[in-house]
Amino acid sequence: MDNPNQPENNPLIPHPGKKMGGGLPLIEDWANYTLSPDGVQLWKTLFHKSACLSCAWGTGGQKGGFTNEVGETLQRCVKSVEAISSELQPGIQPHFFEQYSLTDLQQLTSHEADRLGRLTFPVILRKGDSHYQRISWDEVYTIVETAFKKPSDRIASYSSGRSSNEAAYLLQLMMRSLGSNNLADCSDLCHRASAVGLKTVFGTGTSLVSLESLKASDCVVLVGSNAPANHPRLMNELIKIRDRGGTGIVINPVEEIGLKKFGSPAFPVKSLVSGSDIASLFLKPHPGSDLALFIGIQKSLIERGLIKQDFLQAYTENWQTVLQQSQATSWETISDTCGVSKQDIETAATLISQAKGVVFAWSMGITQQLHGVESIFSIANTALMTANVGKLGAGLMPIRGHSNVQGFGSMGVTNNLRKEIQDALERLLGRSLNRTPGYDARSLIDAADDNKVDTLLCLGGNLYAANPDLTQAKRALGNIETVIYLSTKPNLGHFHGLAAENTIILPVYARFENPHKTTVESGNNFVRLNDEGKTHLKNADLVSEIDFITELAHRLL
Ligand code: SF4
């Protein structure tokens, strides 16, 4: 059987010579997973009432394993199956860490580390040791409690969007009660620009578009996103928009074939084999030049009298300045900067102006560049100029990655808490809290590199490998006295992101195994309730993240 986890076997990632993304290989992939010896357990888990583990498009939850927020069924993609399959691996054997030294483990690739199996007991690597060793929970709590009794500016956390809202809320409550705002999060590295850009313009840092609203739009402008590989079910909505006579404008430097044509298993007759058209117009700007492209679209709208001046007058401020800037920028500058012709930019502007409702969506092609926030301003300004805000079928939609990455922000896991939430927490705790912003994911690494961090608790994620400079990340983490990882499976951070004194790995339940109900929030602001569940792991010594943080907070506070 092909291993579908290998990129070359992944049908969601088109390869040279392919004429469309998705298609029949997706069915083959489903079959490979679900007809395997683990198939029964896999199907059982797919039907468990908990949200998809994979991306933040979101499905499942209390409505059922395959049901989305508007009640549509059969809403699962193969990425979801892949994520569950990975959590259903057997447990790591009791003598594994005695057998393999750190040097052995450091030879593994990311994929090989993931394939070692589920973590089933707590382990520690003490300074100078060559092997991780099993440790009791009593010892864990004693070491971690001592590690957190450090000056509040020298303790920190890092989190990913894997865990629940409840664990996220408790984590930030504990950290803030200890006086620390050092709550770095993986979203600092992906959609921070979206949060800042949207908050500045609209007062909210999250999507302005629900699934229901997307379904009412007749044009989507998709910018800097490889949705066929990363958010496959979004492709179904793009197909439906084309089917109802709408348009898809794709803006991406690389001509991803899946953004032109995608074969979706959701439409077995009309799409799966022959593929469905996605982009009505495909613009390929130079990487990082989206700002210029959107100024061009605005300029074209202004020159042809296509902006909605009444809307701007009624609902916006300082709009004249934005218009003046676009008008003052020459076509030569625009096209030279972004590499897209005036004619193509005008076509995009025409399509946008002709639509009844336009959704502007983007991923990290926009946020992970020098002009991330400014690019979001330019997208927002384009939406406002065309009155595509504040109505069903229109708006701005950052496409988020990790399944609960947005929930972490909503629960207050941020280094720079909103004043309203801070005030509420102070009322809850009956005392004032530290108001100095803490470290985000990048400044945490810089601070650790400068020997300013003693203790780091990682709630999921892989801070080491998420950093662009692995040499610095390794050195920085190596300056921290104690690093505690709460994880379901091994990752490279466990073998390279090692603390100066104690590195502790704590095995936790996956979302569908937690002994209590939890919630997560999708990228379109839909909160899902996850039922409690059971783990398939025999004799595993796992902890729920909620229990761990509660116990630690109880001891410390
Ligand atoms: S699109 Fe995302 S949320 Fe939906 S099933 Fe696939 S991975 Fe899960």
Image (cartoon, helix red, strand yellow):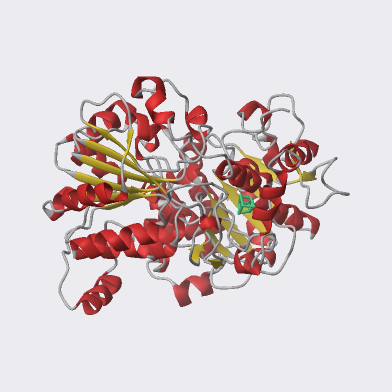
Where residue 79 appears, as percent x and y from the top left, is 63, 44
> 351 or 162: which is nearer to us?
162
Q: Tell me if 251 is positioned left or right of 233 in this view.
A: left
> 275 or 548: which is nearer to us?
548
Q: Residue at x 59, y 58 (%)?
A: 58
Do we see residue 351 in this rendering? no
Q: Tell me if 114 is positioned left or right of 151 in this view.
A: right
Q: If the image is split into quadrants, where does the C terminus sit?
A: bottom left
Where residue 289 appears, as percent x and y from the top left, is 47, 39
Q: Tell me if 312 is positioned left or right of 185 in this view.
A: right
Where residue 451 appears, as percent x and y from the top left, is 14, 37
Where residue 536 appears, as percent x and y from the top left, is 58, 49
> 315 or 332: which is nearer to us?
315
Q: How many marks?
A: 0
Q: Tell me if 213 is positioned left or right of 405 in this view.
A: right
Q: If the image is split into quadrants, where does the N terminus sit?
A: top right
Q: Residue at x 78, y 41 (%)?
A: 27
Q: Residue at x 48, y 44 (%)?
A: 364
Q: Residue at x 60, y 47 (%)?
A: 84
Tell me if residue 44 comes above or below residue 455 in the rendering.
below
Do we see residue 455 in this rendering? yes
> 18 or 476: which is nearer to us?
476
Q: Residue furthest right?
A: 269
- In the picture, residue 68 is in which quadrant? bottom right
Tell me if residue 276 comes above or below residue 69 in the rendering.
above
